[in-house]
C-alpha cells in the first residue's frame, strides 16, 4: 500500500520508479504483478486521437469604445457569442464560412498555439454601455487575456471498431471505410490508453493533473456521455466507449506537436488532442489494472453503414488482433488501420515519465472521483406531455 | 533491370485491340498494370509499369504503341507525404490496398514504399491532417 502523498515524496527525492503503460507490461511479465505493486510508483498512460468535443475559452480584452460582441468570427469561423462582452468559446468542429470543412475551430486553436495572428471580426447591436457595433482586428495567443482549452469529452475509455458492409465507400469520423468490409478502423491506444489502465476510476477524477496538448492540464469533470455502466469483461475493462473525462488547460504552454487540427472528408473538422495521465500504483489492485495488455482489451466491431443509433455488433476483437493489421469478421479477413497515433501516444507517455522522474510533475489526489454509476440516456423525440416521470426508488 | 511508369491513352477505336498482349509477346516486356479504365467505344486509360533488361527494349515497345495511335505519357506524378504535418495516425493505411503505406510495431511511424504505390489516390482524402498530396 502506498499513498499519493508518499509517492510525491519519492518523486521530490528523485526516488520514484516510473514506467510507461507499455513498459509495465514487460516488467510484469518478467517479475510478476506483486513486484509491480511493490516496486513501481507511477505508470504513465497516453493517447493522441481525434476528439471532436474540444474547444477553447478566450477573452479578448476590451476595445475603445468597447463592444459587447454577439456575432464573432475567428479567421471566418463562427465562435460563440452568448457569453459576456468579450468572452467566447471556439469549438473544434465549427466550420469556416468561406472554406467549409477545410478550416474549422480546431484549425483556429492550432493556429493560436502556433503563434499565428488570428483575424477577429465581431458585431453587436450596441448598448448604452457598449456603444461599438463592429470591430475587425488581429490577435495572437500572447495578446489576449485568457485562452484555455476546455474539452467536454475526451479520452474515451475504449471505442468501437468500424467497418462498412454496404456496396459503396463511406466517409465517417472513423475514417474512410471501404465497401464490403474492405477495411476496419479503430481508435484507442489500447494498453497505453489512460482510462483503460484505471478501469474503475480509482485514481482519476476531478483535479487530476495531466499532460494536455504538450502542456499541463487537469481533469475538470466527468466527460459528457460518461457511461461507467457499459459492459465489462472479467478484468473490469469495458467493451465499449464507457468512461470519458472533461479536461481543462492553459493553451499557452501547449504545442502543435500534441494539438492538431484535422478534417475528416465529408464529415468535418476535429482536433487531435494529446493526453497523458499518470496512474499511481497504490496497491495490488492498481498494479493489476496498469498491467492490462492489448490482448485483454476487447471491443466490438460495428457496421457504420447503418445510419441508426444502435448498430449491430458484427464481432468482438481485441487490440492485439487489431494491432496485427488484420482481423477476422464472420470468416472474412479484414485489414485494420488505427486512427489515433500510437507513435505520439508513446512519445507522450515517455515525456510525462521524464517530467515525473525529473521531479517537475507531481501527482494529485482527485477532489472527486469520476462517477462509477451513471446511466447514459438516449434522446427520444417526444411532445411536452410525454416527458417520462422518473420512477421513485422504493424505501425500506 | 530498366523500369518505366507510363500512362497509355487509347483512342476509342483501339480499346478492343490486344495491344498489351503484343507488348508482352513480341517485345518481351514485363507488364504490371497499376490502373485501368477501359470501356468499349470510349477512350481508354492504362497506367502501367513496364520492365525489361534494357531501356531500348522498352522504347521499342512504346514506339510500337505510338505507331498504333496510342498516346504515351510518362507518369510524372507521385504521392508525397509532408513529414512535418503527418501525425502517424495510420488512417491512410486503411485505404491503401497495395500496402505502399504501412504502419506497425514497434515505432508505429508511417512508412511509404513508393514502388508499391499504384497512384489510386484514396489516401489523399483519407488523411485527416491533409498531409498527403499528389505532386507533378
Image (cartoon, coloured by chain):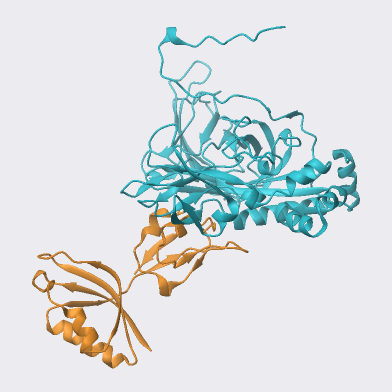
Is B93 placed above or below A141 here? Answer: below
* Residue at the spot 44% in from the left edge and 53% down from the top edge: A331
Q: The N terminus of chain A is located in which quarter?
A: top right
Find residue B97 and report its horizontal and vertical position in percent: 40, 63
Chain in cyan in the render: A
Q: Left or right of A288: which side holds A259?
A: left
What tint does the image give chain B?
orange
Residue A215 visible (yes or no): yes
* Residue at the spot 56% in from the left edge and 57% down from the top edge: A323
Q: The C terminus of chain A is located in which quarter?
A: top right
Find residue A146 and report its horizontal and vertical position in percent: 63, 35
Q: Left or right of A215: which side holds A363?
A: right
* Residue at the spot 49% in from the left edge and 43% down from the top edge: A270
Of residues A343 and A1, the one drawn nearer to the viewer in this rendering: A1
* Residue at the spot 63% in from the left edge and 24% down from the top edge: A374
Residue A112 visible (yes or no): no
Find residue A9 and report its horizontal and vertical position in percent: 90, 44
Of residues B58 and A395, the one drawn nearer to the viewer in this rendering: A395
Q: Left or right of A179: which side holds A344?
A: right
Q: Residue furthest toward the front?
A: A331
Is A340 placed above or below A148 here? Answer: below
Is A305 placed above or below A183 here? Answer: above
Of residues A10 and A307, the one drawn nearer to the viewer in this rendering: A307
Picture quadrant of residue A32: bottom right
Q: Give the tally of numbered discs.
A: 0
Find residue A219 and report its horizontal and vertical position in percent: 68, 35
Amino acid at each position: 500500500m502506498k499513498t499519493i502523498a508518499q509517492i510525491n515524496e519519492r518523486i521530490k527525492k528523485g526516488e520514484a520508479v516510473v514506467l510507461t503503460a507499455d513498459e509495465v507490461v514487460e516488467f510484469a511479465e518478467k517479475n510478476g504483478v506483486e513486484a509491480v505493486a511493490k516496486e513501481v510508483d507511477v505508470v504513465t498512460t497516453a493517447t493522441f486521437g481525434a476528439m471532436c468535443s474540444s474547444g477553447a475559452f478566450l477573452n479578448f480584452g476590451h476595445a475603445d469604445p468597447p463592444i459587447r460582441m454577439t456575432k464573432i468570427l475567428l479567421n471566418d469561423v463562427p465562435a460563440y457569442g452568448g457569453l459576456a462582452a468579450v468572452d467566447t468559446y471556439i469549438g473544434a468542429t465549427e466550420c469556416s464560412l468561406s472554406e467549409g470543412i477545410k478550416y474549422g475551430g480546431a484549425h483556429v486553436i492550432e493556429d493560436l498555439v502556433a503563434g499565428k495572428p488570428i483575424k477577429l471580426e465581431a458585431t453587436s447591436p450596441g448598448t448604452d454601455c457598449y456603444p461599438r457595433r463592429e470591430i475587425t482586428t488581429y490577435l495572437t495567443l500572447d495578446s489576449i487575456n485568457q485562452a484555455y482549452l476546455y474539452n467536454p469529452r475526451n479520452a474515451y475509455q475504449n471505442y468501437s471498431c468500424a467497418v462498412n458492409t454496404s456496396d459503396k465507400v463511406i466517409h465517417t469520423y472513423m475514417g474512410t471505410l471501404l465497401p464490403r468490409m474492405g477495411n476496419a478502423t479503430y481508435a484507442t491506444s489500447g494498453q497505453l490508453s489512460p482510462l483503460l489502465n484505471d478501469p474503475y476510476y480509482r485514481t482519476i477524477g476531478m483535479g487530476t493533473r495531466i499532460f494536455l496538448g504538450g502542456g499541463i492540464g487537469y481533469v475538470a469533470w466527468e466527460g459528457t456521455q460518461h457511461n461507467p455502466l457499459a459492459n465489462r469483461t472479467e478484468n473490469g475493462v469495458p467493451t465499449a466507449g464507457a468512461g470519458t473525462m472533461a479536461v481543462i488547460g492553459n493553451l499557452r504552454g501547449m504545442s502543435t506537436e500534441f494539438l492538431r487540427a484535422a478534417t475528416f472528408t465529408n464529415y468535418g473538422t476535429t482536433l487531435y488532442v494529446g493526453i497523458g495521465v499518470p496512474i499511481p500504483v497504490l496497491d495490488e489492485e492498481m498494479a493489476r489494472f496498469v498491467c492490462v495488455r492489448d490482448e485483454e482489451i476487447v471491443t466490438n466491431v460495428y457496421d457504420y453503414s447503418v445510419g441508426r443509433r444502435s448498430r449491430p455488433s458484427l464481432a468482438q476483437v481485441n487490440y492485439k488482433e487489431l494491432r496485427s493489421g488484420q482481423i477476422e469478421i464472420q470468416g472474412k479477413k479484414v485489414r485494420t488501420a488505427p486512427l489515433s497515433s500510437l507513435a505520439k501516444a508513446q512519445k507522450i507517455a515517455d515525456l510525462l515519465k521524464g517530467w515525473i522522474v525529473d521531479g517537475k510533475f507531481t501527482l494529485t489526489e482527485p477532489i472527486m472521483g469520476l462517477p462509477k454509476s451513471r446511466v447514459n440516456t438516449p434522446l427520444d423525440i417526444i411532445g411536452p406531455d410525454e416527458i417520462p416521470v422518473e420512477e421513485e426508488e422504493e424505501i425500506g | 533491370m530498366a523500369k518505366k511508369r507510363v500512362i497509355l491513352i487509347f483512342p476509342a477505336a483501339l480499346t478492343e485491340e490486344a495491344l498489351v498482349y503484343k507488348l508482352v509477346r513480341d517485345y518481351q516486356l514485363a507488364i504490371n498494370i497499376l490502373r485501368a479504365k477501359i470501356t468499349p467505344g470510349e477512350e481508354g486509360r492504362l497506367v502501367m509499369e513496364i520492365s525489361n533488361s534494357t531501356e531500348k527494349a522498352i522504347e521499342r515497345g512504346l514506339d510500337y504503341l505510338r505507331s498504333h495511335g496510342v498516346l504515351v505519357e510518362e507518369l510524372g506524378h507521385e504521392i508525397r507525404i509532408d513529414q512535418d504535418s503527418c501525425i502517424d495516425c495510420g488512417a491512410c493505411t486503411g485505404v491503401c490496398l497495395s500496402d505502399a503505406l504501412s504502419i506497425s510495431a514497434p515505432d508505429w511511424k508511417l512508412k511509404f514504399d513508393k514502388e508499391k504505390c499504384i497512384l489510386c489516390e484514396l489516401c489523399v482524402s483519407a488523411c485527416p491532417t491533409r498531409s498527403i498530396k499528389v505532386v507533378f
